[in-house]
């Protein structure tokens, strides 16, 4: 059984449940553990099943004084801290082989098993910001928190515990330049033989589209990156903004220094990828009456 987790408030429920729907359509042997950071838990818990488990903010955070202080004083930071905290909480309470954190605005095109097969016997799995070479300094970090894997092993738990402690307790200021994200670089140096980075998996995002030749995406699910043909396994629709009343969307409200805004209209395949995501969100909105 593949154990996954995600987090959102009610405003992102459509996206988080679209993530779940994409996993349902591509994968079989998984459970998605979904933490709601507000009172929207009450409205969706009726949809629970063996593949989808909801958790309220009180379930997970109520007894942590530091986390609750962050919630009152630094709400954005509080939300960032839950990626590591909730992952750790799940591993501490359950005998899972591993836990994989996934941002709620991600969509899968292929079986999540491909990610786990690529990570293999490594204790930690990370996915790059591919526009930067590894080993340089970038304030946003060399890895994205969109998908992060930890094995339930000595090294995996040690790394996850370190990440949660560092973020929640706001340690190591030099690594706090982009929420919880830059901390992931520590694993590359602390456990160089225990970390799997990317593998042969393509992953889309506003900061990656300009790197890819998307010509084969609709024919066989592949893209070209640095002369390598790779299967697109998931995409991160960061800062995708919807207006359902007007039936319109903005593909990305930021990140234009990476993929210019015009590309989302001029590149027909890229436009199609984002239109498909918008249609998925609308279907989810209707199915779950959101």
Image: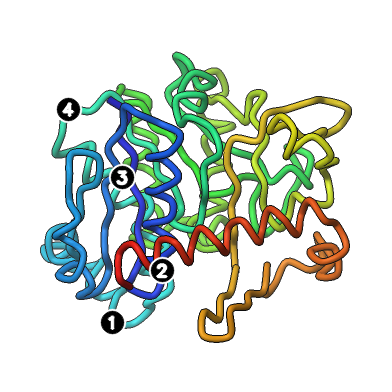
Q: Residues within 10 Å of mark 3 (few under 14, many from 20)?
A: many
Task: Specify the label residue 87 is tagged with.
Answer: 3
CB atoms of marks 1 and 3 within 8 Å: no
- Measured Cα–Cα span from mark 1 to mark 2: 20 Å
Q: Quadrant of residue 74?
A: bottom left
Q: Quadrant of residue 154?
A: top left
Q: Earlier in the sequence, mark 1 or mark 2?
A: 2
- Measured Cα–Cα span from mark 3 to mark 4: 13 Å
Q: Position of residue 280 (x, y in %)?
A: 51, 58
- Measured Cα–Cα span from mark 2 to mark 4: 29 Å
Q: Position of residue 226 (x, y in %)?
A: 86, 32
Question: What SS does tag 1 mark?
Answer: helix
Which-is-in-front pick, marks 3 and 2?
Answer: 2
Which-is-in-front pick, marks 2 and 4?
Answer: 2
Q: Quadrant of residue 252?
A: bottom right
- Measured Cα–Cα span from mark 3 to mark 2: 19 Å
Judging by the rendered image, the residue that carries numbered circle 1 is 72
Question: What SS does tag 3 mark?
Answer: helix
Q: Residues within 10 Å of mark 2 (few under 14, many from 20)?
A: some
Which of the pair 76/18 is nearer the observer? 18
- Seen at 31% across and 32% down, the residue is 30
- Seen at 39% across and 68% down, the residue is 285
Q: Earlier in the sequence, mark 3 or mark 2?
A: 2
Q: Earlier in the sequence, mark 1 or mark 3?
A: 1
Task: Specify the label residue 12 is tagged with.
Answer: 2
- Seen at 39% across and 37% down, the residue is 100
Q: Residues within 10 Å of mark 4 (few under 14, many from 20)?
A: few
61 to the left or right of 290: left
- Measured Cα–Cα span from mark 4 to mark 1: 32 Å
Judging by the rendered image, the residue that carries numbered circle 4 is 95
Question: What SS does tag 4 mark?
Answer: loop
């Amino acid at each position: 059984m593949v154990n996954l987790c995600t987090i959102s408030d009610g405003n992102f429920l459509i996206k988080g449940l679209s993530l779940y729907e994409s996993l349902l359509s591509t994968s079989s042997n998984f459970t998605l553990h979904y933490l709601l950071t507000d009172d929207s838990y009450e409205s969706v818990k009726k949809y629970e099943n063996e593949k989808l488990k909801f958790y309220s903010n009180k379930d997970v955070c109520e007894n942590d004084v530091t986390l609750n202080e962050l919630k009152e004083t630094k709400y954005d930071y509080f939300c960032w801290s839950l990626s590591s905290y909730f992952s750790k909480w799940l591993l501490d309470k359950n005998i899972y082989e591993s836990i994989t954190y996934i941002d709620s605005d991600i969509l899968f095109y292929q079986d999540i098993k491909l990610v786990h097969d690529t990570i293999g016997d490594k204790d930690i799995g990370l996915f790059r910001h591919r526009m930067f070479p590894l080993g340089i300094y970038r304030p946003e970090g060399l890895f994205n928190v969109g998908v992060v894997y930890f094995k339930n092993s000595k090294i995996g738990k040690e790394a996850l515990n370190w990440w949660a402690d560092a973020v929640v307790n706001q340690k190591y200021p030099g690594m706090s330049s982009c929420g919880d994200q830059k901390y992931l670089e520590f694993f590359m140096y602390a456990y160089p033989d225990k970390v799997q980075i990317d593998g042969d998996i393509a992953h889309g995002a506003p900061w990656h589209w300009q790197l890819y030749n998307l010509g084969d995406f609709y024919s066989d699910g592949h893209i070209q990156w640095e002369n390598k043909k790779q299967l697109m396994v998931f995409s991160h629709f960061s800062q995708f903004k919807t207006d359902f009343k007007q039936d319109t969307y903005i593909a990305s409200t930021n990140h234009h220094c990476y993929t210019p805004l015009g590309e989302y209209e001029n590149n027909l395949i890229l436009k199609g990828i984002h239109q498909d995501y918008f249609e998925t969100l609308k279907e989810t909105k209707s199915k779950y009456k959101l």
